[in-house]
Image (cartoon, grey):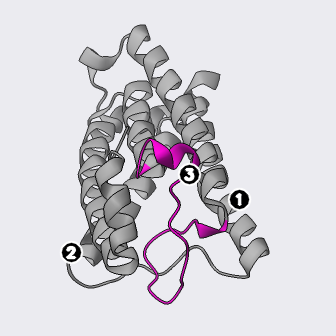
Amino acid sequence: MLTDWLPFAYFFVFLIVAVLWRAYRVWKQTNVNALTSYHTEGVYGLSSTLFRLVFVGFGIVTIANTIPSAATFLTPLGWLEHDIFGWLGWAILITSLFIVIVAQIHMGSAWRIGVDTSQKTTLVTKGIFQYSRNPIFFAIRLCFLGLLLVLPTAWSLMLWALGDAMIQVQVRLEEQYLFETFGKQYERYFESVRRWM
């Protein structure tokens, strides 16, 4: 069915818009690779690796959903298979993509994936960042929840829970880096703007 392909199509578009297109735009503006290298040691290494695996996992789940013989192995969750949850999931997915696009526009050339201590950027506090210190991570949390609601399976539930936990860890590690990098400027921002929304 066509509807079986919609979650995969959304996920593909989300990755293109939220990662590849923005990385290309930053590279064109600054000649800097925004897809920075993640630390491989300690908690940061573990959380960033698990975070990337969640994205890969959701990619696999959305592809498996398009193959009837594979979809049964995803273990559907009957208690979540209601039209209202599906429509709510799509509303959340569309909202999350919108937030990512707006936040990335406001970040401009300061956008990065991961923390790269060798590159100096500015602290972005305007636009959507006046209301949330982490609008992109917030949008990714919404994206994972939306995918769970439109693809209610045991695998989606596990990936949503793991992804949300890893985002919580990632945000706190990045906050530590921002405190060290921007000092009082970030401290004032931290105290005046919420972590999420």
| Quarter where residue 79 is shown | top left
Task: Specify whether 42 is left or right of 1.
Answer: left
Badge number at residue 43? 2
The foreground one among 92 and 115 is 115
Residue 112 lies in magenta, yes or no? Answer: yes
What residue is drawn where x is 40% and y is 63%?
52
Q: Circle 3 — which element? A: loop
Residue under label 3 = 126
Q: Which secondary structure, mark 2?
A: helix
The picture places residue 40, in percent across and down from the top left corner, at 32, 83
Quadrant that contains the N terminus: top right
Q: Nearer the viewer, mark 3 or mark 1?
A: 3
Q: Which residue is mark 1?
A: 21
Residue type at tag 1: Trp
- Within-10-Å neighbours for mark 1: few <14, some 14–19, many 20+: few
**Callout 3 touching callout 1 (CB < 8 Å):** no
Q: Residue 75 in the image: x percent, y percent?
A: 29, 32
Give the magenta range.
Answer: 109-134
Indicate the amino acid at tag 2.
Answer: Val
- Is residue 15 a member of the stretch shown in magenta? no
